[in-house]
Amino acid sequence: MKTIGLLGGMSWESTVPYYQTINRVVSQRLGGLHSARIILYSVDFHDIEQRQHAGRWDETAELLGDAAHALRRAGADFLVLCTNTMHRVAPQIEVAAGLPLLHIADTTAARIRALGLRRMGLMATRFTMEQDFYRGRMEQRHGLDIVVPAQVERATTHRIIYEELCLGRVLEPSRQEYLRIAQQLVDVGVEGVILGCTEIGMLLRSGDLAVPFFDSTLIHAEAAAEFALQGEVPAC
């Protein structure tokens, strides 16, 4: 079994289900008292968030690259970045660490394509919805058609993530707002909705709408467990 290097804390609320899910999959696959070999480096999200909103992405890449290199020194065989938004600097992290990185957009897209779906809605932070590092990868590498909410709804989605979910606040009015936004995506013809921020699964679940949700957190964690057991991680 390979040793997984988890780069988490962004936010820690969504890092917890990574640990739980990876160990659950390994236990189910191997039985008995088996669990995953995991090394976790959890950053102070305040430092990352401040640089995100200031547009200082090179500094976030340096911080996370140093953390990833520490995971390599500790014995990790590959990296799992426990956040969607910070995949904006995934190539820099991979180079700094000298380890392969399992990309969250690739694992999520593979699950979608396995079901024969193509036109997908995306709910995430404003960075993930509006910049090309995530949408572009899914469209260019995986042939998906990605639809995002309108500008006002993007702002609402972003605000709830940072002001509520990252703080562990799960509020019913916000859940209803997310359902409204997701339904607007369904109304324009999407076949499913990607929960493209690792905290959104705290609010939405499959079965809430007529189309499926694809929780990137759970999909990424399950893929990490499978790669640790038998897979080869594709290059970022």
Image (tube, helix red, strand yellow):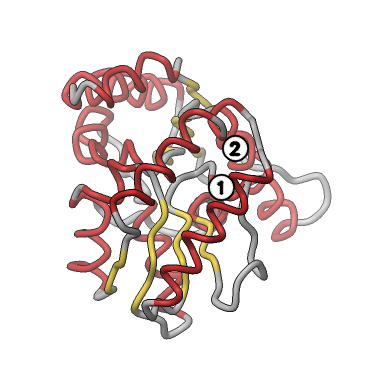
Is 213 on the left-hand or right-hand side of 84?
right
What is the three-letter code of the residue carrying label 1?
Met
Label 2 belongs to which residue? Answer: 37
Label 1 belongs to which residue? Answer: 1
Asked if residue 123 is positioned above or below residue 125 in the image, the reply reads: below
Answer few, some or many: residues within 10 Å of disc 1's Cα (few below 14, many 20 plus, some between 14 and 19): some
Residue 126 image point, x, y percent: 31, 43
Does the residue at mark 2 contact the one at mark 1 (Cβ under 8 Å)?
yes
The answer to whether residue 6 shows anywhere in this view is yes
Query: Which label belongs to residue 91?
Result: none
Which quarter of the figure has residue 164?
top right
Furthest residue toward bottom: 116
Which quarter of the figure has residue 172?
top right
Q: Residue at x 44, y 32 (%)?
A: 76
Q: Secondary structure at mark 1?
A: loop
What is the three-letter code of the residue carrying label 2?
Arg
Asked if residue 140 is positioned above or below residue 56 in the image, the reply reads: below
Is 34 on the left-hand or right-hand side of 81?
right
Instruction: Give the mark toward the camera: 2 or 1.
Output: 2
Q: Secondary structure at mark 2?
A: loop
Residue 14 image point, x, y percent: 56, 37
Is 217 on the left-hand or right-hand side of 19?
left
Residue 3 image point, x, y percent: 51, 38
The answer to whether residue 39 shows anywhere in this view is no
